[in-house]
Amino acid sequence: MLPLRDEIPTKRVPIITIIIILLNCLVYFYQFFMIKDLHYFVYSYGLIPYEITKGVSLVPSVSTPIQLTVFSSMFMHGSLVHLAGNMLYLWIFGNNVEDFLGKLRFIIFYVLSGIFAALGQIIVSPNSTVPMIGSSGAIAGVLGAYLILFPRARITTLVFFGFFIRLVKLPAIFFLGLWIIYQFLYGLTEVSLSGGGAGVAWFAHIGGFVGGIILIKLLSPRKNYYSR
């Protein structure tokens, strides 16, 4: 399933969402067109669970504190498809969450969702030396918040049935419910096969999603709001 748009208009231009998308695109351009040693760059600024849990750097020449990789890794991507998929999700769901929270709260929300995501993966694979990169953990937090705020919103979605493709409108609670179930099932499969130390950081997605559900309630600018 591939989401294309939702049907909830925003009251304000989602400036922070746009800025985050631009930052991710700029970092991707820098990674692949300006960096000569991409492997070194990824290991320097990607989040490596082993470094965080052991407090040691696997790349000694990097002067940046390893704790900051929790933040820097949120703006790095492994491929153009990786970047495009994440930015599509952020644009569709992020603008409404930003509209609800406001600019400053949304920045805080996004960063904290990324931290929740990092913790989710670190807890599952604390000794992994594989760099974790990508904004999908923080964006998963946006999805969790969207589910709470707009569970009945209609998501225009491309659904693939083998060679047949259909355009359908799905309730957000159905679309996002399937999404998190998918993450959980594949996360369990990867942990059982590899100990969670390789491939997609499924539990970062789960951690971010759960974090988003918690944070949207803590950071809500209004005590009472209505789900759509």
Image (cartoon, rainbow, N blue to C red):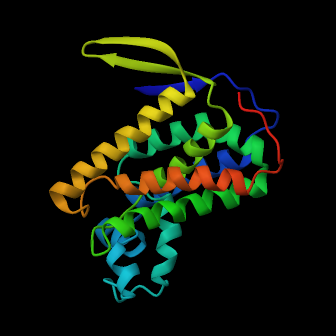
Q: Nearer the viewer, residue 192 or 103?
A: 192
| Position in image of residue 51 (x %, y %) | 36, 81
Q: What residue lies at 40% left-to-right and 60% top-to-bottom? A: 133
| Position in image of residue 30 (x %, y %) | 46, 60
Q: Nearer the viewer, residue 105 or 225?
A: 225
Quarter of the image containing the N terminus? Answer: top left
Name above or below for residue 119 compared with residue 57.
above
- Asked if one can make out residue 134 in the rendered structure from this viewpoint, the answer is no
Name above or below for residue 22 compared with residue 91.
below
- Asked if one can make out residue 44 in the rendered structure from this viewpoint, the answer is yes
Left or right side of 219 for 42 = left
Question: Furthest residue to the front?
Answer: 224
Q: Nearer the viewer, residue 73 or 185?
A: 185
Q: What residue lies at 55% left-to-right and 42% top-to-bottom? A: 143
Q: What residue lies at 66% left-to-right and 45% top-to-bottom? A: 18
Name above or below for residue 218 compared with residue 92.
below
| Position in image of residue 153 (x %, y %) | 63, 25
Name above or below for residue 149 compared with residue 65.
above
Quadrant for residue 165, please give it. Answer: top left
Q: What residue lies at 69% left-to-right and 58% top-to-bottom? A: 107
Quarter of the image containing the C terminus? Answer: top right
| Count of numbered tags | 0
| Position in image of residue 25 (x %, y %) | 52, 50
Quadrant for residue 44, please give it. Answer: bottom left
Left or right side of 186 for 84 = right
